[in-house]
Amino acid sequence: MQRYFLLVVLIGLTNISCYSYTNTRNTTSFEGGKKYKITNRNGIKTKMNAIEVKNDTLIGLYKNQKIAFPINEITKSEKRRFS
């Protein structure tokens, strides 16, 4: 019984993932395929997966829908990283 409990605890600990968001230095440098938390001029925060940057517009996925953010309206951006 103790071995079973120890095995379950070890499996649970190895499957835990810790992600955090770090500030990006420049709000105009985005990488496709990365996850970002973006704040626009109105203070609305959105977590999205960036796909690409075209013509000063960030295109990404939010809740399985493609959305476009004008880069000049982004006031703060944070990049997701594994810690």
Image (spheres, rainbow, N blue to C red):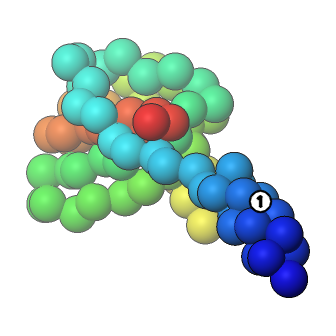
Count of numbered tags = 1
The crowd level at tag 1 (other Cα within 10 Å; few <14, some 14-19, many 20+) is few
Residue 6, percent from left and from top: 75, 67
Please indicate whether residue 29 sits to the left or right of residue 68 in the image.
left
Q: Residue furthest bottom?
A: 1
On the image, which quarter does residue 3 sit in? bottom right
Residue 13, percent from left and from top: 64, 57
Residue 4, percent from left and from top: 86, 74
Please indicate whether residue 21 sits to the left or right of residue 2 in the image.
left
Q: Nearer the viewer, residue 24 or 46?
A: 24
Quick check: 36 above or below 54?
below
Residue 20, percent from left and from top: 38, 45
In percent of the image, x 27 and y 25: which residue is there? 24
Quick check: 7 above or below 48?
below
Q: Nearer the viewer, residue 9 or 56?
A: 9
Please indicate whether residue 42 sits to the left or right of residue 82 in the image.
left
Q: Quadrant of the C terminus?
A: top left
Quick check: 25 above or below 81?
above
On the image, which quarter does residue 28 sit in? top left
Q: Residue furthest front?
A: 2
The residue pinned by badge 1 equals: 11
In percent of the image, x 52 and y 21: which residue is there? 31
